[in-house]
Image: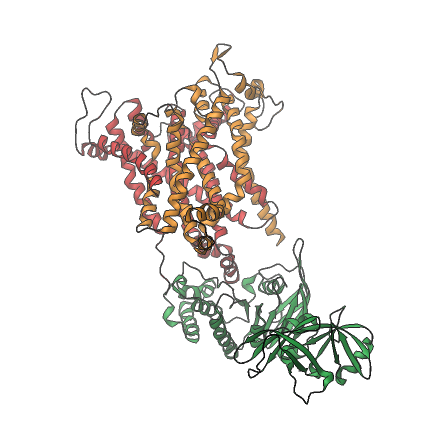
Chain colours: A orange, B green, C red
Amino acid sequence: MSARRLRHGALLLLAAVYSLFPIYFITVQSLKTPHEDVFGSPLWLADPDFENYTALFEGAEARVRGFVIIPRVPFLAWLANSALVLVGSLALTLGAAVPAAYALGRLRPPGWRACRRVLFASYAVPQTILFIPLYQVIVRLGLDDSHAALVLIYSMMALPFCVWILSAYYRHLPREIEESALVEGATPVRAFLRVVLPMSRNVLVAAALFTLGTVGNDFMLASIFLLDPEKQTVAAGLGVMDVSLEELVAVAGVNLAAIPVVAVCALFARTYVRGLTAAMLEGA
Amino acid sequence: MAQVMMKDLNKKYDEVHAVKDVNLHIRDKEFVVLVGPSGCGKSTTLRMVAGLEEITSGEITIGDRIVNDLPPKDRDIAMVFQNYALYPHMTVYDNMAFGLKMRKFPKPEIQKRVQDAAEILGIQELLKRKPRQLSGGQRQRVAVGRAIVRHPQVFLFDEPLSNLDAKLRVQMRVELKRLHDRLETTAVYVTHDQVEAMTLGDRVVVMKDGWIQQVGEPLDLYSRPANKFVAGFIGSPAMNFIDVSLSDAGGLWAEGQGLRVKVAPAHATRLSAYKGQKVTLGLRPEDLRVASGGDPAEYTIDAVVDVVEPLGSEILLDLRAGQTTLVARVEPAVRAKVHETIKFALVPDRARFFDTKTELAI
Amino acid sequence: MAPAGALVLGILAYPVAWEIWASLTDFSSRAEGGPVFVGLANYGRLLGDTWFWKALATTLGYLAVTTTAKLVLGVGMALLLARPSRLRALVFLAVFLPWAYPGGITVIAWYWMLNPPLITSYSVFMGNVKHAVDGVLGAGAWAFLSVMLFNVWRGGSFTAVFLLAGLNAIPTELFEYARLESRSAWQRFRAVTLPLLAPYMALAVFLSFTTAFADLGNVWMLTGGRIIFPVVGTYAYWLAVKSGQLAEAATWTLALVPLLALGLVVLFRWFDPHEETPA
């Protein structure tokens, strides 16, 4: 029994190391002085140096280093933009997903299953490949070079999954829950807002984190739709930096931007799993 | 066929001591029921026998093998779970054949055993269905069938009837009893329902807080409970308890909470040591009846009727007597009205006395 | 329902329609005059193009390999995390991290780490790896492989957490019963765990496809088209952006849709079965 437990522990550690190593590795690189970057070991740090990180904040103006002109790095602006896009996407995704899921899962109009499937089938269209006509849509809507474009597209990408899990959850929620609220004199809307919505908190968190993951995973669309450096998100901004051969600064930026995201995810990780579980009970 | 022995069995979780020094000898072919309120350690005990929980200390023997270190699959047991644990992706047939297939039984043998079990349980027509398509009672039968096909040495039942509605529960209870008479396999059965325990068990084990309170045949538990807990747990409605002190005034008298009754001579010798002390008097509702003129006054209690619950075959009366409340179970012919004061006679020999401090029967 | 439907289908409808239209013309940003309707000529050409078949094979291979790897890792880690242990909470967070780490930018870091553009302490080592891999699989293989590794690393994390949630949704008695009845852990895994998890795995597989494309797109964009391995998606960009052959690009793009749709139909059977009515 204890041998098995030991093996289990070892495998757990292995999973942790496997998951963390790449992050550790890039963090180590980002903390290196140029000298150590070339002559040190790639696996550990002798002399941590935060220059790559401070550069993100100093670089508000273009500057010259050696023969290279280092472009402006309005990192704080990028962070703010990312946050804006994220908040917008979350609001739009959840705002659209909740009523849709409730309608599909609870009211179950004829053909609700087909509706849900069609919605989900939109994943069969590789959105990232559609960017040329997508760009036309965005221009037609007058949203080019605007954060709203990304908000729309990200929401579109996250929605089907969110609708799926929320409707699965609502489908199996006992009807008595709203009925008792209705009997107590609440209007259907109030019953939904005060009873059903709080009960689905975990599933909402799961949907929100999935949206966060979707938004966080994109680089390409952001770099296509946002051209003005001041308007770019962190991903788009850092992505273009490779041209300047400043990849370690870019890596530092990745880490900095990741900190709040990771903090939020760590905080809600358990709830995320609980939410998914709640949606999966009694079949997906 | 096998006996099951538990010796000084203990189970400790991080903070909870769930099972404490359990010693139990379940004889070959015996049907033993573990009963108690939730959290009393009965399920944990069963799961240790099954091998689903590690044993913290002590020893379990099935047949003549110590099974502490045997994985569940090698213990030659079959278990029926509360939620049936049927596999949704398999047909009834495949569910029933699962254990045999895993053990690589030859196909004709599997087929024969499943057919036989299905016949015993009357579920031949369901073999091709999926569990989803079955009613609660049918699922229950499949779960039992799945245990039967294995011809195990011991059946383990973990609250198998608690998901069924009342009527079906009574029906399945009878079927399980019949099944046990037919198969004669040792069975350990866990339930929180004392009626189930009393009707099914050859012997009943009452547990509380991880301790065994009493082991005995159902009627023994009823008539000679070892302590106040067992007395209150077995029997429905529960036994009435009255805190009294014993005094000597021409025989032994129990007095307290505004009531005063004489102690039957049969109990007097045992109780004489408690003279002047506090004890708990236990009266079963069925041992209180409406007094007639011939009843001796020293064995009667005056009570006011609070609530009348006519059940048809009997009437339950919730009573106020002195500063306490009592329940009496009386003939359906009794016409009692609320607020009416009635004189009740008790059956003196059947009164129980418990040490108020230790709660043990005197 | 309406707003969500409008959002998803509305935004997608025009691009899809446009792609279909474009694929039926000779639309090109370089051509003189407007696009001319050419019917299915583009598709005909596509099917006769050995380059397309090669790209399709690469794409399917990419999807198959990354998805399998993600499933294997995901199931493994989910099973590890499902068992109680003191380490569990911490390891769970660690496993969650690759997915939580914003992928769109991590892939940048990842790519440059595995393909260091400058001289760093390990660039010789990485250079050797690159030459070894490219030597066997062809030029550009290492860059491609590094994207696959990233996709598996991040997607495996998502799959693990997703399947862990799935495991939690399955009543524990089902696993306990299996422990009583089966002879080996492997038997148990095959007869019980795998079929019970299958619907969730199917869902995870489909989500895995979408990120697989997204990651490729990210890196392709990031490196200015340095993913030179022929993949249907990236080659479509190439045609569209670099050489303006929009009609061909559309044809390439759409060629994938029937395959993905077919996959979806198969997967629906797993994760969205019509419930049988109880007797």
Q: Quick check: C133 left or right of B203? A: left
| Observer able to see residue A178 | yes
Number of marks in picture: 0
Is residue B353 or residue C231 the one in the foreground?
Answer: B353
Is residue A183 or residue B152 the one in the foreground?
Answer: A183
Would you place residue C235 above or below residue A273 in this image?
A: above
Residue B71: give x, y in percent of width and height: 57, 61
Quarter of the C terminus of chain B within the rendering = bottom right
Is residue B56 or residue A177 the one in the foreground?
Answer: A177
Is residue B289 or residue C227 the one in the foreground?
Answer: B289
| Observer able to see residue C75 | no
Q: Quick check: B233 left or right of B131? A: right
- Residue at the far bottom: name it: B294
Would you place residue B298 above or below residue A31 in this image?
A: below
Would you place residue C251 above or below residue B340 in this image?
A: above
Q: Quadrant of residue B38?
A: bottom right
Q: Quick check: B287 left or right of B159? A: right
Q: Which residue is at 35% across, 40% downward?
A: C4
Residue B199: give x, y in percent of width and height: 56, 77
Would you place residue A103 above or below residue C143 in this image?
A: below
Residue A164: give x, y in percent of width and height: 39, 45
Residue A66: give x, y in percent of width and height: 51, 10
Q: Which residue is at 27% across, 29% downward?
A: C249
Quarter of the N terminus of chain B within the rendering = bottom right
